[in-house]
Amino acid sequence: MHNAHPYTFDIPETGIPTSYDNHIVRRLSAMKGQYRDTDAFNALLEQDDRILYEVYEFRRPEVSSELLHGVSIIHPGRVGDEYFMTKGHFHAVLETGEVYYCLRGRGMMVMETPEGDWSVKEFRPGGVLYVPPRWAHRSVNTSPTEDLVLFFVYPGHAGHDYRTIEQQGFRKLVVDRDGKPEVIDNPRWKQAESR
Ligand code: S6P
Ligand code: ZN
């Protein structure tokens, strides 16, 4: 853990920051139930429990005066016609936002609120995305070949609610149609029993 002194780091081409405290690796098996093509999911998992994405974090105290930050790298690939993507989450403290800055690659952020609003925004290098409080968010890599590299910043006390998305999914999916990303309704979206 860093002390309270200022620090700097660089994010090179690879997306792996020159220093970090924690490296999280998320594999296909962590995404069970999230892809709508379960046959494709099982077939891929049988071959290899592949790494879909990685997160490099700076560990800071989880208090509201802190800003948690790091880099997520979503690798290219698909499960059926759905792209590799993050699990996605609401913040446990719903009234907390997040800023994303895209350094490399192409992708989309799929978002929704408990009230039923949804939004899908594009990521391209140099683009900034503001995720307001209350919006669940999932990053999707729509490039067939390149990593999607995202820098993120959010309040220290935000926490994560993964369960709601695990239960209900997102209202929208991003699928590949003839080499192009298309946003469609999630046929299996259902309101989670309790939040
Ligand atoms: C945390 C922030 C990101 C994600 C990361 C991986 O609030 O949104 O650091 O953690 O992009 O996604 P997920 O959904 O697996 O945490
Ligand atoms: Zn978040």
Image (cartoon, helix red, strand yellow):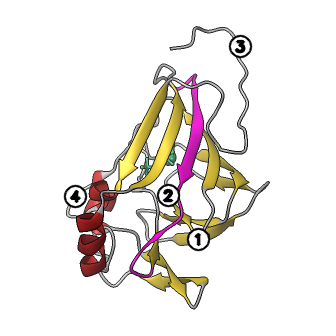
Which residue is located at x 50 percent, y 57 percent?
135
Q: Earlier in the sequence, mark 2 or mark 1?
A: 2
Task: Give the number of the mark in front: 2 or 3.
Answer: 3
Camera-side residue of 164 and 26: 26
Q: Residues within 10 Å of mark 4 (few under 14, many from 20)?
A: few
Which residue is located at x 71 percent, y 54 percent?
104
In the rendered structure, does residue 91 fall within the stretch colored magenta?
no
Q: Mark 2 = which residue?
A: 137
Q: Amino acid at mark 2?
A: His
Q: Mark 1 = which residue?
A: 142
**Residue 63 location, x and y as percent?**
48, 23
Q: Is residue 7 above or below residue 187?
A: above
Task: Give the number of the mark in front: 4 or 2.
Answer: 2
Q: Residues within 10 Å of mark 2 (few under 14, many from 20)?
A: many
Q: Earlier in the sequence, mark 1 or mark 3?
A: 3
Q: Amino acid at mark 1?
A: Thr
Q: Is residue 137 above or below residue 46?
A: above
Q: Amino acid at mark 3?
A: Pro
- Secondary structure beneath disc 4? loop
- For the residues labelled 4 and 1, the Cα–Cα distance comes to 32 Å
Q: Earlier in the sequence, mark 4 or mark 2?
A: 2
Q: Residues within 10 Å of mark 3 (few under 14, many from 20)?
A: few
Provide the residue span drawn in magenta: 64-81
Q: Amino acid at mark 4?
A: Ser
Q: Mark 4 = which residue?
A: 194
Camera-side residue of 126 and 163: 126
